[in-house]
């Protein structure tokens, strides 16, 4: 119980609760309870209801709906582009106001192999290894080391073609990148 209380208190003490409240998710108790659940346990969503009923989270967030079907519906809503935009807007604002306003970033992409059939999965040839994957681009603030942004792109997209779009998206969130440190995957003529 102490861990749950500590994490909730920490989120509030550092002002990160403002980021979580900026997301129009319909049930902020679900979001807070799921964050605690995912931080504290490595159990499947099918165990979340039992965990919640016996945890301090049920006192803090009595409105949470933690059965696995409601969690799936909630995560689907949370995964929409609009919710991601709300999160990144609030997260980057919080980061700039509370941690660092450094416009220098580290950008890297990685392939996430999978066999799921959805629009972002595609055939990739990376170092002569052919696989079905999604590319995830991650942006980290150089000085603080805090994550700023992530983006998903189809697996057929090469790293270098995501760079310009990532820097443009950062500028839409108020990050005027003046230096980007990249790996060799972004090298091009």
Image (cartoon, rainbow, N blue to C red):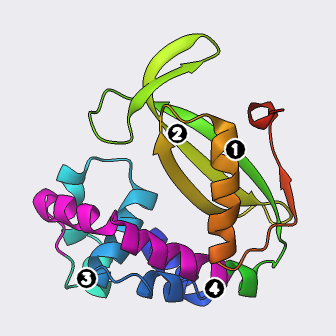
Is residue 91 or residue 85 the one in the foreground? Answer: 85
Please report the bounds of the magenta region as a residue range: 65-94
Q: Which mark is residue 27?
A: 3
Residue at the spot x=23%, y=59% of the render?
48
Is residue 25 or residue 128 the one in the foreground? Answer: 128
Q: Which mark is residue 14?
A: 4
Q: Which mark is residue 55?
A: none
Tag 2's secondary structure? strand
Q: Which mark is residue 108?
A: 1
> Horizontal placement of 148 versus 9: left or right?
right
**Observer able to see residue 147:** no
Quadrant in which the C terminus appears = top right
Mark 2 and mark 3: Cα distance apart in space: 30 Å
| Residue at numbered disc 2 | 135
Nearer to us of marks 2 and 3 is 2
In the rendered image, residue 79 lying in the magenta stretch gets the answer yes
Sequence-wise, the earlier of marks 4 and 1 is: 4
């Amino acid at each position: 119980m102490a861990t749950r209380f500590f994490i909730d208190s920490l989120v509030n003490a550092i002002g990160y609760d403002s980021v979580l409240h900026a997301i129009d998710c319909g049930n902020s108790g679900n979001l807070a309870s799921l964050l605690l659940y995912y931080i504290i346990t490595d159990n499947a969503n099918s165990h979340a209801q039992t965990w919640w009923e016996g945890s301090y989270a049920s006192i803090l967030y009595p409105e949470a709906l933690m059965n696995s079907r409601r969690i799936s519906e909630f995560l689907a809503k949370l995964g929409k582009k609009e919710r991601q935009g709300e999160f990144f807007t609030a997260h980057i604002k919080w980061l700039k106001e509370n941690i660092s306003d450094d416009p220098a970033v580290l950008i890297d992409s990685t392939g996430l192999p999978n066999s799921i059939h959805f629009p972002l999965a595609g055939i990739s040839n990376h170092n002569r290894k052919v696989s079905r994957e999604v590319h995830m681009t991650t942006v980290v603030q150089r000085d603080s080391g805090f994550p700023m942004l992530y983006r998903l792109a189809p697996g057929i997209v090469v790293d270098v073609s995501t760079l310009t779009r990532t820097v443009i998206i950062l500028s839409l969130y108020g990050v005027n990148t003046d230096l980007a440190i990249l790996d060799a995957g972004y090298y091009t003529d």
